[in-house]
Image (cartoon, grey):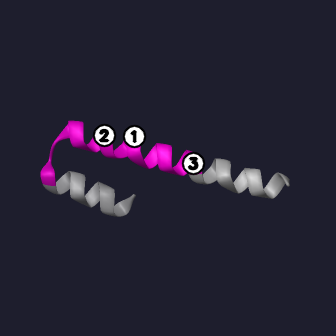
Amino acid sequence: MLTCYVCSTKIGEISDISKCFENFVSQALGLLARFYATDLR
C-alpha cells in the first residue's frame, strides 16, 4: 500500500490513486477470504 501511495503521489493523478486503492482493497479482501477459508477448516 505504501508503494502504491508513493507511486500515485509521484504521478499526482486522483484517478490513479482511486484505481490503485481499488486494487489494494480487492487484494486485501482476497487475502482475508483465503485466510478465513483456511482458518475455518
- The first of marks 3 and 2 along the sequence is 2
Q: Main secondary structure of the magenta part?
A: helix
Q: Nearer the viewer, residue 38 or 24?
A: 38
Q: Nearer the viewer, residue 14 or 27?
A: 27
Asked whether disc 2 touches disc 1, contact meaning CB atoms under 8 Å apart, the reply is: yes
The percent coordinates of residue 15 (x first, y second) are 22, 36
Q: Secondary structure at mark 1?
A: helix
Query: How far is mark 3 from mark 1, CA to CA?
Result: 12 Å
- The first of marks 3 and 1 along the sequence is 1
Is 12 in the magenta?
yes
The percent coordinates of residue 12 (x first, y second) are 14, 47
In magenta, the rendered stretch is: 11-30
**Residue found 20% across the figure and 53% down from its top:** 9
Would you name the residue on which mark 1 appears? 22
Relative side of 41 to 19, left or right: right
Q: Residues within 10 Å of mark 2 (few under 14, many from 20)?
A: few
Q: Which mark is residue 19?
A: 2
Is 13 in the magenta?
yes
**Residue found 80% across the figure and 57% down from its top:** 39
Quarter of the image for the N terminus: give it.
Answer: bottom left
Mark 1 is on which residue type? Glu
Query: How far is mark 3 from mark 2, CA to CA?
Result: 17 Å
Q: Which mark is residue 36?
A: none
**Residue found 85% across the figure and 55% down from its top:** 41
Comparing labels 3 and 2, the label whose residue is closer to the camera: 3
Would you name the residue on which mark 3 appears? 30
Q: Secondary structure at mark 2?
A: helix
